[in-house]
Amino acid sequence: MSVVTYIKESFKELNHKVTWMPFPEAQKSTVVVALFTVLFAIAIFLVDKAFQFGLAQYFKLFN
């Protein structure tokens, strides 16, 4: 099987045999994923800052 044949058959399968979710549902899912990604990034940032502050205070005890 040549690479060209493989690519053609892959596109054919994606167009005819794969069931895709409706576009409005895909948009809603994308918004939900983006929102949770931002919230998770903020949570990690806050935890990182808390550890940074805590360690800074700990090391100030030994100065």
Image (cartoon, rainbow, N blue to C red):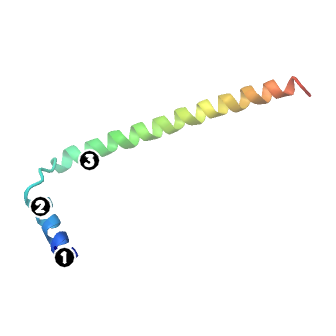
Residue where numbered disc 1 is placed:
2
Q: CA distance from mark 3 to mark 1?
A: 36 Å
Locate residue 15: give its quadrant.
Answer: bottom left
**First-in-chain label (3 vs 1):** 1
Residue where numbered disc 3 is placed:
27
Q: Are marks 3 and 1 in contact (CB under 8 Å)?
A: no
What residue lies at 33% left-to-right and 39% top-to-bottom? 32
Q: CA distance from mark 1 to mark 2?
A: 17 Å
Residue where numbered disc 2 is placed:
13
Q: Mark 2: which amino acid?
A: Glu
**First-in-chain label (1 vs 2):** 1
Q: Secondary structure at mark 2?
A: helix
Q: Badge 3: few (under 14), some or many (20 or more) residues near its Cα, within 10 Å?
A: few
- Tell me the mark number nearer the camera, choosing from 2 and 3: 2
Q: Are marks 2 and 3 in contact (CB under 8 Å)?
A: no
- Looking at the rendered image, the quarter that the N terminus falls into is bottom left
Locate residue 48: give its quadrant.
Answer: top right
